[in-house]
């Protein structure tokens, strides 16, 4: 016997890997705001709340045994309680960290924490989010099941062929966001400041940022650190070509739930340096425990200097160990199989 599950995703679509998880458990796809659209629109608060109410009441609850929600939205678990239907949240984004970090205003924080307590369970990506959920909710925390993300196999084939320039002081960050809170979330400011600090001791260092960011964001960051040797490359279709030029991958995120780009860099043979608030740190730790650093440009610069001072043989050892780990254990197939197992555990009491 299996449950009939609805998967409610965000707009314009769910994340590709989340969609793959939902497909693997045989879920039926819906948008989170199918009855009255709000998720990708800037609306006054009262309109947003009204549309939550409309979506909550118009959703075809009777057609399903339970719901899987992409992210921790507020209305599904509350309506789920009323309808006596289990509602699980697939959490692979910034909400838990922003609650921990005090990012939200008090009313938003209170509403989110209240809603989180009413989910049937959490399917989180990575141990970092599991720890945050338990810390934030304490004894009221619903059951937590931990998965991980993986790199799609065809992409891995291309990445595995890359030969990075491990002696070259060129450092890459892959981060998309346009503007606003994602600048803080992705740690763009920390990346630029770190390169700026490195130039004092390593004048030939260069930073490359791959991803879509508004011109105003780029100008603000580069003007804050005059003369910094950082280039914004914009979206890149063949990331392998960028990785092939570099000697290190650096991901200084503030609450990045996972960070598949970290795994992709490792698959391309680039040793990865990440912040302690990047979920994929658990992968980096298996290769290079020293590659996990605090949210400090000064500490990051020190670690990068020590990395480039290593003998080439040690850099190659880190490169190959990381690549082997990703190719053997962190593929999309492995991630999907893990999700199927934890979802089976989460739903077992309802069969």
Image (spheres, grey):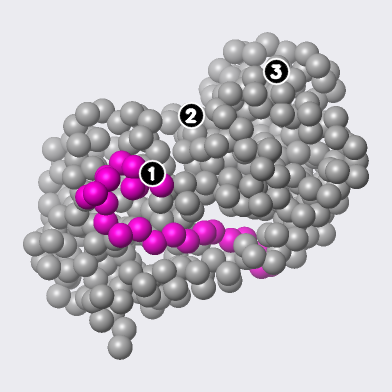
Which residue is at 41% across, 47% downward?
Answer: 131
Q: Residue 63: x and y, percent? A: 19, 77
User: Disc 1 or 2, which lies upstream in sequence?
Assistant: 1
Q: Residue 77: x and y, percent? A: 20, 57
SS for dot 1: helix
Quadrant in which the N terminus appears = bottom left
Mark 2 residue crowding within 10 angstroms, few (<14) / some (14–19) / many (20+):
some
CA separation, marks 1 and 2? 19 Å
> Which dot, 1 or 3, sits closer to the camera?
1
User: Disc 1 or 3, which lies upstream in sequence?
Assistant: 1
Q: In this rendering, would 15 be left or right of 187?
A: left
> Which dot, 1 or 2, sits closer to the camera?
1
Which residue is at 79% across, 33% downward?
Answer: 307
Q: Residue 216: x and y, percent? A: 53, 22
Which residue is at 26% across, 67% downward?
Answer: 67
SS for dot 2: helix
In this rendering, is residue 217 above or below 141?
above
Q: In this rendering, would 102 be left or right of 179?
A: left
Q: Residue 107: x and y, percent? A: 19, 32
Task: For residue 165, say whether it is visible.
Answer: no
- Name the residue nearer the viewer: 226 or 113: 113
Q: Which residue is mark 3?
A: 196
Label of residue 132 in the image: 1
Q: Which residue is mark 2?
A: 184
For residue 161, what is the image quadrant?
bottom right
Q: Magenta span has 155?
A: yes
Mark 1 residue crowding within 10 angstroms, few (<14) / some (14–19) / many (20+):
some
Q: Magenta span has 106?
A: no
What residue span does the magenta drawing correspond to? 131-156
Q: In this rendering, would 142 be left or right of 310?
A: left
Task: For residue 266, say whether it is visible.
Answer: yes
CA separation, marks 1 and 3? 32 Å
């Amino acid at each position: 016997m299996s449950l009939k599950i609805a998967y409610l995703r965000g707009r314009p679509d769910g994340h590709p890997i989340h969609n793959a998880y939902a497909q693997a458990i045989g879920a039926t796809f819906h948008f989170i705001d199918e009855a009255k659209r709000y998720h990708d629109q800037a609306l006054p608060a009262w309109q947003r709340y009204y549309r939550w109410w409309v979506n909550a009441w118009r959703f075809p609850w009777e057609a399903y045994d339970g719901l899987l929600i992409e992210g921790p939205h507020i209305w599904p678990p509350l309506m789920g309680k009323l309808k006596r239907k289990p509602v699980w949240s697939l959490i692979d984004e910034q909400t838990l960290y922003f609650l921990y970090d005090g990012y939200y205003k008090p009313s938003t924080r209170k509403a989110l924490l209240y809603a989180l307590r009413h989910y049937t369970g959490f399917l989180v990506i990575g141990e970092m989010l599991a720890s945050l959920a338990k810390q934030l909710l304490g004894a009221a925390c619903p059951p937590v099941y931990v998965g991980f993300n993986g790199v799609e196999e065809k992409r891995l084939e291309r990445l595995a062929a890359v030969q990075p320039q491990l002696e070259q002081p060129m450092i890459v960050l892959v981060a998309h966001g346009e503007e606003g809170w994602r600048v803080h979330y992705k740690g763009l400011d920390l990346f630029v400041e770190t390169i700026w600090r490195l130039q004092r001791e390593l004048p030939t260092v260069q930073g490359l940022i791959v991803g879509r960011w508004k011109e105003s964001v780029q100008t603000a960051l580069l003007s804050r650190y005059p003369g910094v040797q950082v280039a914004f490359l914009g979206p890149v279709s063949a990331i392998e070509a960028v990785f092939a030029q570099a000697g290190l991958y650096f991901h200084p995120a503030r609450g990045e739930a996972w960070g598949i780009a970290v795994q992709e860099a490792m698959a391309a043979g680039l040793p990865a340096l990440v912040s302690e608030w990047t979920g994929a740190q658990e992968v980096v730790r298996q290769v290079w425990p020293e590659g996990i650093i605090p949210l400090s440009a000064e500490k990051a610069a020190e670690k990068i200097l020590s990395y480039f001072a290593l003998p080439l043989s040690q850099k190659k050892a880190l490169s190959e160990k990381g690549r082997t780990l990703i190719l053997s254990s962190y593929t999309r197939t492995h991630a999907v199989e893990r999700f199927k197992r934890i979802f089976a555990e989460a739903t077992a009491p309802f069969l």
